[in-house]
Amino acid sequence: MNKLNKFIVAGIVLISIIFLFSQMVSAENHEIAGIKFEFNILTEDITAETLIPMHQFMEKTDLTINRFADNYFIFQLDDRHMLIIPGEKEVRIGREKYELNTAPLKINDDILIPYSLAENFLLGEDLVKRDNNDVEDEINNEIKTGLHLVLMPETKTVKKNDEFEVKIKLINYTSSSRSFTFNTGQKYELQLLDKDDSVVFVWSRGKAFIQAIQTLEVEAGEKEKWTAKINTSGIEAGKYQLKGWLTDRKRSLTADSVEILIE
């Protein structure tokens, strides 16, 4: 086959691909916060996780999108700020961190984010912290019996030399009050363990606690809540297991471990 024929065949193949793609892609008109927008998708249905391009909203609202550092983007609208890193599921809105199910993407000069995130940000509504909500749903819907200790990190992905919060909940789903006795003022312990089960972080290390016997009463149907901070300084990037337990005399409860990724 000579060069001309090869060129013609390649052209036909390219045109066929373009034609097939154009048949798959359909323009969709939608509305968020009273603002109409359109974009092309490869599916007929838009879900909460469908990625939508955001630059078009800059023409219809006061939204600004600014890039800084290597791959950080700041969305600003009115008094709201959102930090996005394409390819990562964690976003920051103000001082809060949130974990998404679908990571934002950067395509050419546009940033695509999940439909639900775009809707919440444009409307100025609070975004539910998905990790915590999932844990709450599990407790509320499936295991409303017995005593439970639950770890609820604000994020499961954290940067090196950063800090994140963990909520610790002691939940009494029994029909009577429960009493816990502690030898000191410390009520719980948290640890990070690496893939070899070596401890790389201990929450209580370096902290001082009241050296006196403490008693905690948790009534039937009630919760006891604490908040702890974990600093990742000096910890290598990788996957870790966050573990926690009550430090009462009987070490009554141990929480299910949670996987934490340090980048």
Image (tube, rainbow, N blue to C red):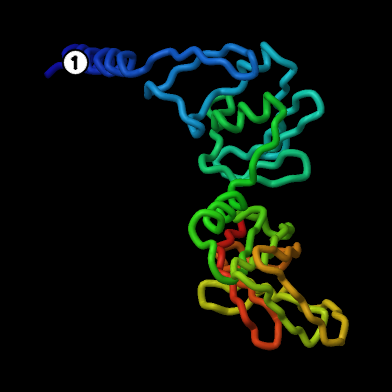
Element under disc 1: helix
In depth, the one of 175 and 133 nearer the eye is 175
Q: Is residue 107 above or below residue 130?
A: above
Foreground residue among 197 and 188: 188
Q: Position of residue 76 (x, y in %)?
A: 75, 27
Residue picked out by circle 1: 9
Q: Amino acid at mark 1?
A: Val
Residue 56, position as x, y percentages in the image: 61, 16
Query: Percent position (x, y) of residue 108?
Result: 54, 25
Residue at the farthest left position: 1
Instruction: Kindly identify the residue that appears in the image at 22 percent across and 13 percent down.
Output: 12
Q: Is residue 180 left or right of residue 108?
A: right
Residue shown at the point (71%, 69%) measured from the top left: 219
Quarter of the picture holding the N terminus? top left
What residue lies at 71% left-to-right and 83% top-to-bottom?
Answer: 248
- In the picture, measured across the screen, residue 232 lies left or right of residue 99, that is right
The C terminus lies in quadrant? bottom right
Which residue is painted at 43% across and 13% down in the image? 27
Q: Quadrant of residue 113?
A: top right
User: Residue 6, relative to residue 219: is it above or below?
Assistant: above
Is residue 71 at least partly visible in the picture? no
